[in-house]
Amino acid sequence: MTKIRISLTVFALLVALSILFSTVPALAARKDNAAEPSEALFLLQIVILVVAGRLLGELMVRIGQPSIMGQIIAGVILGTSLFGLAFPDLQAQLFPTNQAQKSMSNAIGQLGILFLLLLAGMETDLALARKLRKSATGVSLAGIAIPFAAGFALGQFMPADLLPDPEKRLVASLFLGTALSISSVKIVASVVREMDFMRRNIGQLIVASAIIDDTLGWIIIAVTFGLAKTGTVDALTMVKSVVGTVAFMAFSFTIGRRIVFEIIRWTNDNFKSDLPVLSAIIAIMGCMAMVTNAIGVHTVLGAFVAGILVGESPILTRQIDVQLRGLTTALFMPVFFGLTGLQTDLTVLAQPKILLLTLAVVLIASVGKFGGAFAAARVSGLSNPEALALGCGMNARGSTEVIVATIGLSVGVLNEELFSVIVAMAVITTMAMPPTLRWALARLPLREDEKDRLEREDFEKDSFLNQFERAVLVVDGSSNSKVAARIVALLASARNMPVTSLDVSPKDVGVRARQGSAEEPAETSARADIAGVLERHATEAVAAGGDQTAKLHVTAYEKDVDLASALEDISKSGHDLLFAGLEPVMTSDGTYSQAIQTTALQFAGTTALVSARGHIPEDSSDFRILVPISGTERSGRAAEFAFALSKASGGHCAVMFIEERQRAGVSRITDQGKNQADPFRQVDAVAAYYDVKPEKFVRQGSSPELDILRYARSGNYNLIVLGVSRRLGATLSYGEIADTLLGTSDRSCLLVETEFAKGRDGGG
């Protein structure tokens, strides 16, 4: 049945293409080639390229090839190589050669290049490249140097009649060397991901090498383009291109990184219209592309670097990523690669010297890339099977070489023959890469250290804490606010999670003197105090975790609106975790305060309530955290919060399993039988992931909330972390256990919503 449906779908699409083709003569009759360009013909070209690219792309995916190969082949079929041979008049009417008409579709193609580079940048994992920089850099440099040198030499000795301008031989040789030496990280990553090797050691090394390869390649292309615009290689042009590129990269990855993040954050938080962040990203890409053009290098470098910075933005949501990827994949990719195929004339391969040149280019590209990567891998200490897989993985050009060839053709460095040769090489090497890489990867056994790492990553994928992307801290300057700020600083900085602070302190509390200096509003002082707490304890988290790259991004919500409206805005802007540091938490009649109820009920995501009681040590490493569990998923998620906090602070953590029994008693887990130890299996896996070793106890009693308090006092614990579920009703409640504990505790508490459910009691 599925095959029948697919066949019917393909048949329907082919019928649609036939109908579209039937409109070509009518459109051509309305517009002469010398006349103004036809908007209807332009739309027809786009529709045909998109539909044909999708059809052939789908076919390629089904036979294990990248979809862009189908898009290029669709363009080749629609061009002069096949469709033009069979129906020359119809092909000429559909894709006329007059400049006015071509410029319309070429404009979409040029945008396609920028969007492709933007997407490639967003997919560039710099953290992975930094992690494997020693091995990956060696592989990348060797894999670039050898085929580049061979391609450059080929250009230098190539017959003059194959060059569009023999006087620009040097620049043409540089373009040829570049086209033969760079791998396509998109193709490499997609095949490695398809083989389920993305998380394997060799898979990560292949992708990291391709990332470095791609990054260096676009820098080389940008500089080469600067030389191509002048037509000659002179010291002044070279210095200008290199210095301009270095200055652009240095600015982008320092000040520019922060600017891009602030633009995305501000747009996301302040615009109410649809897809504002997507518009901001396109504007960022366009501006950076124009900057690189102004310094004399190609716009592709600006788009690529913009993609890297956008991809590193802490608040880039999955929704925005999907939207941008959808726009690029659905429109710009099939149009650009289809136009590339249209410009590729395979009939030139019938000429013996062009065919020999194509074979030489494919041989140089394949042997040079494979040999360089293989040799560097062996020097780095990899085994023969690993080096073999690495060499096969790096030998894919795909979109990168097609873009290089398009740039070379547009500036007159390459003619249509050389352009067709490079595109043919890109198609052949890319289509050969998936089966050879699959064969090589299938020969690699799973190492024990890889197995342990993969198990950790599987846990991380399903982790409760890892699902959160952006936190909000609601404060009023109270002691609860300061403890909440400490907790947020430790957790958010360790996870690189951006934080928005919402100050709800009263605005009419007057002024107060501060350290004998000029008076300032009390709420400003409260905000400054909280900012100081966040900064100080974020530094502690970096020191405790050993991650010198961790940062805490904090922004303030400044709009003068009521709490409910503010929380509604914040919920819509991608915040999914709220820490409430408000006072009081509960009123004298045992119910939650109005501010707490508004906060918990109005915020759409997960809420955590903080209550500061008793002594809280100045040094976070002196935290003594107690997390009660009951074997439920809710308590297991609370334990994850506690372990993450313990890891970030360097403090001590204990887990207490609560059994409701008539006789009360405390015993260490080492004194318990195997069956009693079973409830800890769930939290043991979580503790192993966070690399903490919590103390474990079993508590038996009839009153869980009193047992928790008694044990917290006897063990001198200063923070109780409890998983709760919100009860349905007119007023806020987390159940008898949690409400009683929060109202009577003399220890600081962190109540974390880990699920929404009905039930008798809450907590644990």
Image: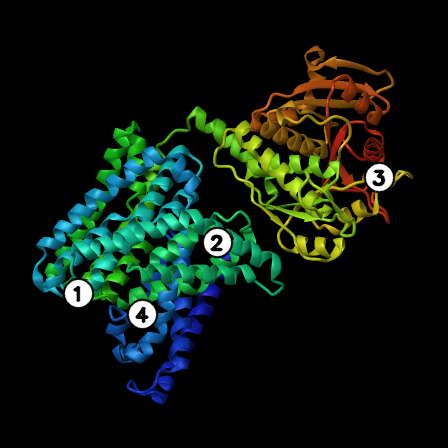
Q: Nearer the viewer, residue 17 or 198?
A: 198
Can you identify the residue that label 3 sits on?
Answer: 586
Res 236 → quadrant: bottom left
Q: Which three-letter amino acid code belongs to the residue tagged 2?
A: Val
Crowd class of label 4 (few under 14; some 14 to 19; many from 20; radius 10 Å) = many
Q: Are marks 1 and 4 in contact (CB under 8 Å)?
A: no
513 left or right of 395 in image: right
* Amino acid beneath label 3: Met
Q: Residue at x 60, y 62 (%)?
A: 271
Q: Which mark is residue 78?
A: 4
Q: Which sits earlier in the primary sequence, circle 3 or circle 2?
A: 2
**Which mark is nearer the camera, 4 or 2?**
2
x 48%, y 49%: residue: 258
Q: CA distance from mark 4 to mark 2?
A: 41 Å
The C terminus: image quadrant: top right
Who comes first in sequence, dot 1 or dot 3? 1
Q: Quadrant of residue 301?
A: bottom left
- As measured in the structure, the alpha-carbon distance from the residue carrying label 1 to the one carrying label 3 is 82 Å
Could you tell me how far apart the alpha carbons at marks 3 and 2 are, in whole angstroms? 42 Å
* Residue 751: x %, y % from top left: 74, 36
Asked whether the viewer can see residue 734, the reply is: yes
- Mark 1 highlights which residue? 348
Residue 397 visible in the snapshot: no
Residue 20, x across and y down, in percent: 41, 77
Mark 4 and mark 3 lie on one chain; the one further toward the N terminus is: 4
Q: Are marks 4 and 2 in contact (CB under 8 Å)?
A: no
Q: Which residue is mark 2?
A: 260
